[in-house]
Amino acid sequence: MRRALVIVLAALAGACTPPLPNPTGVVDLRVVAASFEAPEVLISPCDPRLLVSLGSGGSTNQIDPASLARLLVVGQRPLTYRALVVDPKGEGRELSYRLRACANQGDRECDNTDDFVELTSGKRPAGEWTFTLDGSAPDKPLLGTALLPDGQPLLLEALTQDSSRGLGGIRIPVMLEVRASDTDEHVFAQKLMVVQCQFFPSMRENVTPVLPGVLLRGEPWAEDFVPELSGGDEVLMEPMDFSALEEAYTVPSLSLSPVNLVESWKIAWYTTHGTMSAFETGGTSFDGNTERHRSRWQPDTTVKEPRDVTFFFVVRDGRGGQSWLTRRAKWTP
Amino acid sequence: MVRRWLSVALLLSAASAGAYENARRKEIDGGVHIPVLTKAPTLVTLGKAVYPEAAERAGLTADVKLLVTIAADGTVPEAKVLTPVGDGFDEAAIDALKRSTFTPAEVDFVPAPVQIEFVYRFVLTVQPVDAGVDDAGVPAGQLAHLTGQLLLRGSRNRVNGGTVRCTEYAEREAVADEEGQFDLEVPAGTCSVVAIGAETEVFKTTETLEAGETKEVKFYLFPKVIGYQTVVRDKREKKEVVRRTISREELQKVPGTFGDPVRVIQNFPGVARAPFISGQLIVRGANPNQTLTLFDGVEIPLLFHLAGGPSVVNAEFLDRVDFYPGGFGARYGRAVGGVVDVASRKGASDTWHGVAKIDLLDSSVFVEAPLSKDVSIAAAARRSYIDLLLPLVLPRDPQGGAITILPTYWDYQVRLDVGKRGARSGSTFSVFAFGSDDQLKVVATGGARNFDVAVQFRTLFHRLIGNWTWREGNVQLKLTPYAGYDLASVNFGVAKLDADRWTLGLRQDLGVDLSQYVTLRAGADIYNQVLVGKAELPVISGVQYVSFPGAEPKLETQRIGRTVQTFDGAVYLEGDLKVKPVTITPGLRASHAFLNGQTRHAFDPRLWVRFEPWEWTAIKGSVGLYTQPPAATDMEPPPFGTPSLTHERAFQASLGVAQKITDVINIDVTGFFNRRFENVVSPGRRIVNEDGSITQNRSSNDGLGRAYGVEVLLRHEVTKNFFGWVAYTLSRSEERRAGSTNDYAVTSFDQTQILTAIASYRFPYGFELGARFRYVTGRPTSPLVHTADFQRLDANRYSNTFGMFRSARVADFHQLDVRIDKYFVFEKWTLNVYLDVQNVYNKANTEATLYEYRGRFAVDVPGIPILPIIGIRGQL
């Protein structure tokens, strides 16, 4: 059993490694979150054989023409892409950006030749960026009907490259590339747009998860309220109860039987000063336990000057839905 | 005063070994007939040496160490001085030995010539000018008897062959028999007793004997060295190119291995260093699960308590460990890597012995004893109490809640042996029962904790192994039926998994020496297993449905119940064709398996060649096919398994030379090439069916591997004071997936150079010092290359960017471990206190790598810092 003791000591040795940056502290250029509205587009109803045939590049003669039409029509649905870009040290500098969509989820930069569609690009300072993809202008193309340079619809190419042939939804990677011209900071942030096939009547289109609010030390924290915090004590933050908003939903199993699930939202906690005790809370583990949502803000007490602190609370529903809340506070040492 | 001389004879080797130690080696090993010393020679009459006159006048004394050849009839045709001392002592000792007689030694119960080491001691003693007694013509009524037993101090072992004299009557001498019993007849009066054994210091005392008295005594003789028992080791015939055998002495003394046999094997050539201190065996590039570990020929489900704890079998119960890194005999199968065969030992036949060990975490006891002349028993048990002590040392829950960690384990072994000792033919029987139980309960709740944890694991197994060994002439038959029960249980929140497994098996090994040119071996290796598994667990994301990254949903719970049967029956045949100096051994193993409703076959032809141009040199080579069946549970329908799985296969070839340098030092150089194919790898193939459903196989036979290299082992066998070895491996192991466009890449465990040096030396006054030094090339890694931050916003994770796959290596590993033992020898028992210091110079070796969350840089996780461990062990 001495070995067990040794293993414990070995594990402790791991704690002797140099401290690593805490992901809750947003100190430089980062895309904190991004979302699509709607987060999911449902093809209703849908025959899985259609996806297999289309994804394999096979004949569509055997497929119900109505189903095929529905698949193609769905691509004309207008979408809104939003991104939360944070640049604490940028002091309002202009950031260059490119937004593009591609067919291969493994394409880390989304720029494989003939395999991506340029959506929009430009320069703007950090903040909440919104891009409408409604086909109203060349830089606002409809995502679902976008064509690759070789003329192949992006949606069908994404289906072709999906080893699950759309059984988990046709997932189109949308890449936001952000670059700061005065530094080497360079970020690629991938968000998946999901086109789901309605295999069962119980399948419903996903709704964006939205946190109803945040509690600061147990009290509601309104968006326009800027509390004054001081000292080095931890500050407890929690979300307001959202359990009623978590949706029940259905997905197909690999054998095409319905699997009934319930959303179990995750919250990611960020701050522009100090750190949060928990980076992510929520979700359901393999053993069926659901994690509570609490995180404590720990100010950086090595700083001797007052600071304006911004907090970001990003919620994910595990189906592609994503949104965030922002709160501000003043801290004095 | 007139000086008289006294000669004292010491058998250094054979006699002291004791019959029971040798009897333990009565094995049919691997179906191979192995000559075994079944009876050690004992001294009958010692020729009286003529004390060299000049030396006597000069007052010189000497110990002459000789190598004595004892013929099959017990006479001494030849005696050679090993260490000349001059002054006429060497010639006198040779002359005396050639006039001595012994009881014949027996090999395989047949008288046979052997060689032993012998010390003839020339000692000058003072004889009283007028002793007052004239031995010659002493009336019988004036004689007395000093009778009793010579025992080794600290262990109560019998001092077989020891001598007892009264210095007043030096010509009267008694020699102790196998039980250490002696009977010395001397004139009544004062007797200045001098007793000495082969491995003991001179023992002196004074006894006063009345005329006609028979005085019974026990003399405890202090051992010259403590612990190691020097045994005449027979040359075990080898057909395999490489078989490393580790004795019990080595198993328990290698620094840094905690006496665990599997960990000792990690110090041999061809075995890669496992991360941290895990007991994984990575042999010649094979995965750990491709090396078969057997206990008395039977598979066991786990080797270590609590994954990294002590061995599930008490180290005192082990006799030896045979390790085959490849090219093993047709008796072994179901493995494409290596084979480890751990052999238990039978109980003592002389008297009862015991070992008790206590440390902070567990206690164990081992007892062995003869029940009658032909029946012996050995038993051991261990129980941990870490569950009681851990709460005392665990820090308070930093989260302010409650943490409960309750690891418990126990194990037991009982072995009963029946058989007439010393019989040249007939039957012997044994029954061996052993088992182990591990439980771990971890609960962490409350406080600032967002997530409560409740986990419970249990692993239990029992094995019952019978053995019937029958010998008649040149035929040996060994039958080993066995039965087993395993239980595995996991409770993790709503997830519950329970599996009960029953095993029935039979091994049969037959060896026939048809002539001096031909030996045949044949046997069967059959077992049947039934596994009944039950599970309650959530629907498994990614396995039963296509999951989405981000937040795992609440899932439905499903109940699964399965009964899985495994039958594997194998037969083998191999034969040695011996035309000196060449031995050719062709072999074939054929197996029929019924796995989860499916039938699989395998035929493994193998060939070994051994060429011995000189007595101390052997050139050996082998080629062969090796197969390993998939686990029946891996052949479940998708997505939990892959019904089409078939045997993993390997072609193994090796060529080497073994050179004996001295009686105890040898070197072995072996080159090897292993090609593995149809290895089981995960994930398996994903098939999209026409109806839109997906068949996701859990695994496939798409794995390919190859390994090649050279292994060198320079070894000093266990002698009285020293053992050690230097092992060096230069190798490369690579793998790829069939159908992939990627070329071969080194395996994650590939270690180009592995050097291990081990030495243990026994000093006077009960001190022993051992050391192990290791140098290993760093394991392969893919270099981190940060060009930009790559975020996956749905998963809320970053993707690291790496250079060419496994094109870099972490820093090389090197470490020194030292062990110091001190033995305190009491009359009837020995206390051993030891200090085992790991990583003496506190090298921060890289054991793992942590990456900054955006993948901008990496930091190394160091291994174990300097770690001293103190232990206490008592031995009766």
Image (cartoon, coloured by chain):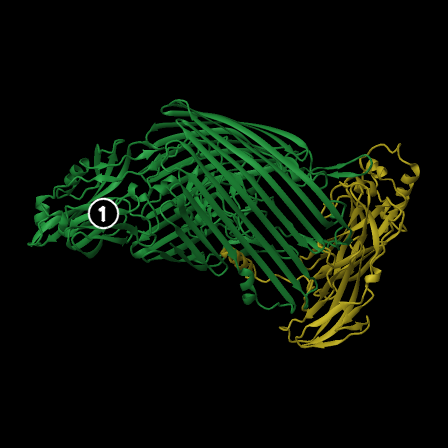
Chain colours: A yellow, B green
Q: Mark 1 belongs to which subunit?
A: B
What type is the residue that disc 1 sits on? Asp
Residue B96: percent from the left, percent from the top? 16, 39
Residue B406: percent from the left, percent from the top? 59, 60
Residue B72: percent from the left, percent from the top? 27, 31
Q: Who's the residue at 73% across and 66% down the image? A: A294
Left or right of B94 on screen, residue B259: right
| Residue B854 picture quarter | bottom right
Badge 1 density bin: few <14, some 14–19, many ≥20, Cα 10 Å = some
Residue beneath label 1, please?
B183
Quadrant placement of the C terminus of chain B? bottom left
User: Nearest the camera: B230 or A113?
Assistant: B230
User: Nearest the camera: B90 or A32?
Assistant: B90
User: Nearest the camera: A315 or B356?
Assistant: B356
Residue A7 appears anywhere in the view: yes
Residue B291: percent from the left, percent from the top? 53, 39
Task: Determine whether A27 is above or below B759 in the image.
Answer: below
Quadrant placement of the N terminus of chain B? bottom left
Q: Who's the residue at 58% across and 37% down the image? A: B504
Left or right of A210 on screen, residue B140: left
Residue B63 appears anywhere in the view: no
> How many numbered discs sit on the rendered protein?
1
